[in-house]
């Protein structure tokens, strides 16, 4: 049995109930690339190593552990980023997603949706200090309780009115989710919007809704630091805040074809920052 809040699964319910277990883990693919000076005459980028983590499929505790093991391999904050996370997930374990999110926020992750990000995935998206999601790639709905098989196939939805344990778990989730979103700097409108969509399936957010809820955007302190860095450049990476935002917002759509080729994604990200008018 699992609770899907914004499609999020509450693992607490899995632990306390002898129900069918568990959701399939999200495959985690990682790749590192040493930072290099990117152009003649440009200020040398912040030293470090670029780390890319791809989260595909359902989010699970196993995925959390793999992220935990991989995240320490990133170092510094070079161009284009020290840590890049690529998302293509229909959801999964909401508790694990929040834990992943807190790890990513501490590591100044740049998070891009390259496929879809629905359900528990939005907790991971919310954690990025840089967050980019194309129109209608983000899906939300109110928390639900379901029974699933070992492959995460939903067998049936549980009526929480007939199951006190499930109802308590859902209520716990609905207390924790807005706290987490506030911690990550999301709009206070995000959780009520999620709660307003309680029917089956997901509600896909428009570009305006993604921006309004802050699921696409920048963490303020990091943005100020990063803009100062780019303003110190003397080559093609020199840019002000508006230009940095504009160029970065193009990365998800322009580079999403390289979601399985992390080295190429890094190159595409750099190219987009350096030459924003390329097709």
Image (cartoon, helix red, strand yellow):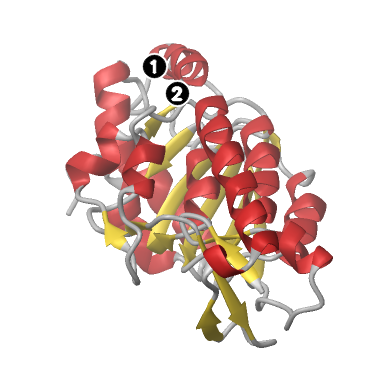
**Could you tell me residue 212's position as x and y percent?**
26, 33
Q: Is residue 54 above or below residue 247?
A: below
Residue 105, quarter of the rendered image: top right
Quick check: 150 left or right of 184?
A: right
Residue beneath label 2, please?
A: 42
Of the 4 image quadrants, the one containing the N terminus is bottom right
Whether residue 63 sits left or right of residue 140 in the image: it is right
Across and down, in percent, residue 113 comes to 41, 55
In the rendered structure, the answer to whether residue 13 lies left or right of residue 161 reads right
Residue at 49%, 57% (x, y): give it. 143
Can residue 92 be seen here? no
Is 101 placed above or below 240 here? below
Label 1: element kind? loop
Q: Tell me what residue is drawn at x 73 percent, y 55 percent.
A: 67
Q: Residues within 10 Å of mark 2 (few under 14, many from 20)?
A: some
Camera-side residue of 210 and 19? 19
Who comes first in sequence, dot 2 or dot 1? Answer: 2
- Badge 2 vs badge 1, beta-carbon distance below 8 Å: yes
**Residue in the image at 56% along x and 24% along y:** 44
The residue tagged 1 is 234
Viewer-closest of 96 and 19: 19
| Count of numbered marks | 2
Q: Which mark is residue 29?
A: none
Query: Which residue is rendered at x = 28% and y = 59% of the image?
Result: 203
Residue 58 in view: yes
- Mark 2 to mark 1 CA distance (whole Å): 5 Å
Residue 66 location (% of width, % of height): 77, 61
Position of residue 271 measured from the top left corner of the image (x, y, whole percent): 35, 45
**Quarter the C terminus occupies:** bottom left
Side of 126 where 204 appears, left or right = left
Quarter of the view holding residue 276: top left
SS state under label 2: loop
């Amino acid at each position: 049995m699992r609770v899907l809040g914004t499609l999020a699964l509450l693992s607490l319910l899995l632990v306390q109930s002898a129900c069918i277990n568990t959701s399939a883990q999200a495959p985690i693919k990682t790749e590192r690339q040493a930072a290099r000076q990117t152009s003649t005459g440009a200020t040398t980028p912040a030293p470090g190593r670029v780390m890319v983590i791809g989260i595909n499929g359902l989010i699970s505790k196993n995925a959390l552990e793999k992220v935990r093991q991989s995240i320490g391999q990133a170092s510094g904050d070079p161009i284009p980023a020290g840590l890049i996370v690529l998302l293509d997930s229909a959801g999964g374990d909401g508790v694990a997603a929040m834990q992943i999110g807190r790890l990513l926020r501490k590591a100044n992750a740049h998070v891009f949706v390259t496929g879809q990000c629905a359900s528990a995935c939005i907790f991971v998206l919310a954690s990025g200090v840089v967050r980019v999601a194309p129109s209608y790639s983000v899906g939300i709905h109110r928390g639900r309780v379901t029974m699933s098989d070992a492959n995460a196939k939903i067998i049936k939805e549980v009526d929480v009115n007939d199951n006190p344990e499930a109802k308590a778990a859902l209520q716990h989730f609905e207390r924790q989710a807005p706290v987490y979103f506030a911690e990550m700097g999301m709009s206070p409108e995000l959780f009520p919007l999620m709660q307003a969509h309680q029917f089956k399936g997901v509600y896909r957010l428009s570009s305006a809704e993604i921006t309004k809820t802050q699921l696409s955007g920048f963490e303020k302190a990091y943005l100020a630091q990063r803009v100062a860095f780019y303003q110190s450049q003397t080559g093609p990476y020199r840019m002000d805040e508006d230009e940095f935002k504009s160029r970065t917002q193009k990365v998800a759509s322009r580079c999403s074809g390289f979601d399985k080729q992390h080295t190429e994604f890094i190159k595409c990200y750099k190219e987009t920052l350096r030459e924003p008018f390329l097709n």
